[in-house]
Amino acid sequence: MRSSKRAYSVIFSVPALLTACLFVTGCGGSSSTPPQTVATSGQNVMPLTVDAGPDNNYVNGAFASVTVCVPGSSTCQTIDGVLVDTGSYGLRILNSVLTISLPGQKSGGSQVGECAGFADGITWGGVHTADIQLGGETAQSVPIQVIGDSAVPATAPSDCSSMGTPEDTLQTLLANGILGVGQFPQDCGLGCTTQGNPTPPAGTYYTCSTSSCSNSFESLSQQVQNPVSLFATDNNGVIVELPSIGPSGAPSVSGSLVFGIGTQSNNGLGSASVFTLDPTTGNLTTQYKGQSYSSSFIDSGSNGIFFLNHDLTQIPVCGSNTNAPGFYCPDSTEDLSATNVGANGTTGNVDFSVANANTLVSSGNVAYNDLAGENTPPPSQPSSSTGFDWGLPFFFGRNVYTAIAGASTPAGAGPYYAY
Amino acid sequence: MKKILLLKFVYPGVGTVAAMLLFCLPALAVLGGDQVSIRNDEAKMRASTRVVAVKGYNVHEIQIPSGTTVREFVSPAGKVFGVTWHGPLLPDLRQLLGDNFSKLEAAQRNRRGHGPLVINEPGFVYVSSGHMRAFTGRAYIPQLVPQGVLTDAIQ
């Protein structure tokens, strides 16, 4: 009786499973997932390298070469070691690596300055205009930030430096620049315009003389722009494509940043699941051990998977005097599972591993798919206001699509992630 | 007539209090500071506040015009024992963290990549997380958290 029931159940469930996998994306199990394809040719493809970066010390950074030109001219410079970041929007270049003079952006005759906030620090500098070449794509007359620029006072305004520590050198930025190609077209949005606020928000845009700056509004089109949204084509988002690596890491990894979603033969969504995002925050929800964490995001510019804390995960943390303070240091690798949930209700399981970060970094490799750390102070109860920061480890072995807010794609308008 | 009299009476009072704050609290230390320093935060951030009384402490919720919300947790002894923030822009952390702000720089120097900034010291706990246009963060001083209050409440 028992065995015949089981046999029936198997006969019934196999075709059901097959049918489901034909029509539903995101079926679990690697056997039903088509093998990953990393695009290597096409005008919409830009090479990515995960290596130690220009400071020769980076762990889990995806770097690319970016060409900037004086608008409308052939006066150009190619800058390597630029961090590709789906958690920010707009191009920022260290003034110390710039050898060409890009025209300053003016507002009412004054140079525009900008303060950009990141979770771990701030960048301060003038806004300049450049034609940007990424792979075979060009965006013309794009406002970018030149960090540590001499067109504005060297010292950031106090309401800028009050938001964090300046990252204005190679040793503090850890890259020659940051290429923000995330889910928004501008770095600030309506909040920095007269439509969004009665007064200019502190720590954003300024008009400057050589000696001082004052807070100012900046219209959407004059804000530092995600250059992808200004391409003539392939402008609705990007795909970060990095191949899978082993559990002990790799000394370097080659992949691609592909422009456009569903605009060319090499950037279709295929069987990827689409997770739409909160239109204000660009976040999705991650569920882990029965709790929902609503401030979660997928960010190529974060160098680990950052989630919860020791009290909640029971995973030991590397000590402050080790090579990986704040990262997880389990005795043996922990295999974990979480579920991402889009605003559209799409759910998808994510299997991930947390290895001993000290062991990993002492190997001398610089690319790891199992590097993870804390993202919450240590209360022992889950808090829905916190989130999972799915950094670069998440990207190895899967093509991750980021659609820009308001841009149309074959799966509807952004913002969304798909993978 | 009555209204004018009232204004005349109240206005100099407020001015005097503000002047006292300016002269008495030049450091504007907030986390770990006295409750009155919250007024400095409101003034500096051009913000509006509402106070929520919870068993064992008060929460001062400061809405900054930029859209970011700051919460300051005040013990019955009048000390600010925790602060949190979430919103599109980072808040004035120097103002909120007081002397502890200087610890961010040392934490930043330790990194081999970008990501959240986490400080876990016996006397200061800090996490700044999120991404451009959606930041979250939290800081508290364990020794100042009132007895019986779980640090989970600081969010």
Image: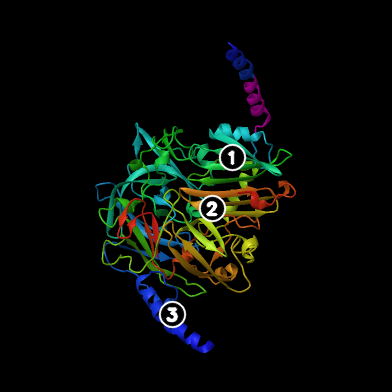
Chain letter of disc 3 in the image = A
Q: How many marks?
A: 3
Task: Identify the residue under disc 3.
Answer: A13
Marks 2, 1: nearer the viewer: 1
- The type of residue carrying mark 2 is Ser
Question: Dot 1: within a 10 Å radius of its alpha carbon, few (fewer than 14), some, or many (20 or more) residues?
Answer: many
The image shows residue A308 at horizontal and vertical percentages of: 58, 59
Which residue is pictured at 25% across the width and 53% down the height? A232
Give the quadrant of residue A269.
bottom left
Residues drawn in magenta: B13-26
**Residue placed under numbered mark 1 in the picture:** B61
Q: Amino acid at mark 3?
A: Ser
Q: Which chain's residue wears label 1?
A: B
Asked if residue B14 lies in the magenta stretch, the reply is yes
Q: Quadrant of the C terminus of chain A?
A: bottom left
> Residue A117 versus residue A278: which sits nearer the camera?
A278
Q: Which residue, given by chain and number where applicable, does mark 2 sit on?
A: B129
